[in-house]
Amino acid sequence: FDLVVGNPPWVRAEHLAPVVREQLAERYHWWRTEAGPAAKGYRHQPDLSVAFLERAHELAAPGGIVGLIVPAKIATAGYGAAARRGLARDLTLHLLSDLTTNDAQFDATVYPMMIVSGKARPPRDHVVRLVADSAQGPCIRQDRLEPGAPWILRNVDVAPLASELSARFPPLGQSHRMHLGVKTGANDVFLDFPEDIEPHLIRPAIRGRDVSPFTVTKTIPLLWPCNDQGEPLECLPQNALNHFQKHRNVLLARTDYKRGPAWTLFRTGPAMAPCRVVWPDLALRLTAVALTGPKHAHLIPLNTCYVMPVTSAAEANATAAFLNSTWARALARLGADVASGGFARFNVRAIARLPFPPTVPLDRRLADFARDDSHPSDQETLDELAAAHFDLSAAERRILASVAGVGARYRG
């Protein structure tokens, strides 16, 4: 066909039958997930639309045009790496338009991207338009779209700087493992329990909304039938036992439950690390807190948080301070998935890719800043400390500050 256009179905992989996922992976190269060192253990299978995207290009004649509306996550998500590689390397991209902020054009909460491509190798120095309704709008050279890396389709001025920093410094995920917080699989059982539950089984839990820069603003009670290593207790006191027996069928039906006591919780190990850096999955900006020492020993991050165990309190404080800097927030936002209301999802993939200077965990000034009660009102001092690790120029600071939404602070 000379022209293939459409709006293919968007279906998350977990909503497809396992046999369908297997067939798609066998049939379509772009639907196969690719492991990467920056996101160990976190590989999500693609949305169904990725298979339609590949099939559309199969149906196009040489030199033909394909125009599709697909999820914007294909430009950034790990599952889209194979598709991005095929699109950037083998096809001529005419338009990549991120429509995630064009709410008036859609009657549902969706995050779409428009792709228009030609079935031919791109000419040298080919330029891709980023706005559908303006020939004079922003553009990007196709050879600057790194084939497997996330594509920066907004704030294109920052793309070369982000690539340079990624080339100069290793990704955070290369040296640190990241995990979702504790999953109950039955919040009604573990977060809404009778008042007569034995007090020693109750721990304070943290949700993503409870994390602010350098501090936890609130906790909620969590029924914690585990020992200090996060392993399920074999025997429970009577009131707790009665409570769990009442909900036994619900507990055994949880997706993550495999074996052990019915009250087993999931992903408890990382959440119990003596020194942890925690940030919310969903937020307006990246926000991190270090949990260290006796004060934080009993706090349990739930699965709306991400947890990164580290080796010492000093490393946790320095790393949390670095993540709260304007520069880390800007770079994280570029790779995060868009959510409604201006929010973004700072998942493992987004944070694991952050360029992370090896000098950060050793910086006593950053660690001391995270321990200082005056830090929330002194963002400029924090930014100065963090900028030294990146060796950012004044112009580079202005570029990153504009992405973080604080450009006025760095206009001088």
Image: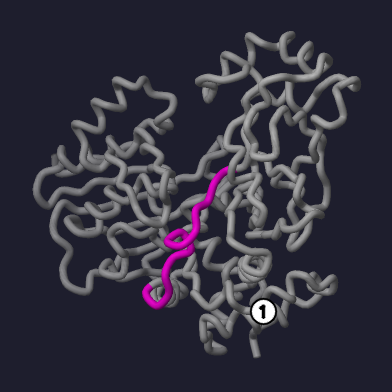
- Extreme front residue here? 235
Q: Where residue 93 sits in the image (x, y, percent)?
A: 26, 58
Q: Amino acid at mark 1?
A: Arg
Q: Where residue 96 sits in the image (x, y, percent)?
A: 36, 56
Q: Where residue 323 sits in the image (x, y, percent)?
A: 61, 66
Q: Nearer the viewer, residue 174 or 362?
A: 362
Label 1 sits on residue: 364
Left or right, residue 289 beside residue 94 = right
Residue 268 seen from this side: yes
Residue at the (28%, 48%) spot, across then down = 83
Q: Nearer the viewer, residue 386 or 8?
A: 386
- Extreme left residue here? 62
- Extreme right residue here? 195
Q: Which residues are magenta?
A: 167-180
Q: Is residue 393 above or below residue 274?
A: below
How is the protein colored in the picture? one colour
Left or right, residue 84 beside residue 304 = left
Residue 282 seen from this side: no
Residue at the (27%, 49%) spot, across then down = 82
Q: Where residue 32 sits in the image (x, y, percent)?
A: 27, 40
Q: Report the quarter where the C terminus lies.
A: bottom right
**Is residue 95 in the magenta section?**
no
Q: Is residue 140 above or below residue 337?
A: below
At label 1, counting other C-alpha atoms closer than 10 Å, the crowd grade (few under 14, some 14-19, many 20 or more) is some
Examine the image and state in which quarter residue 330 appears.
bottom right
Q: Report the quarter where the N terminus lies.
A: top left
Q: Is residue 300 above or below residue 191?
A: below
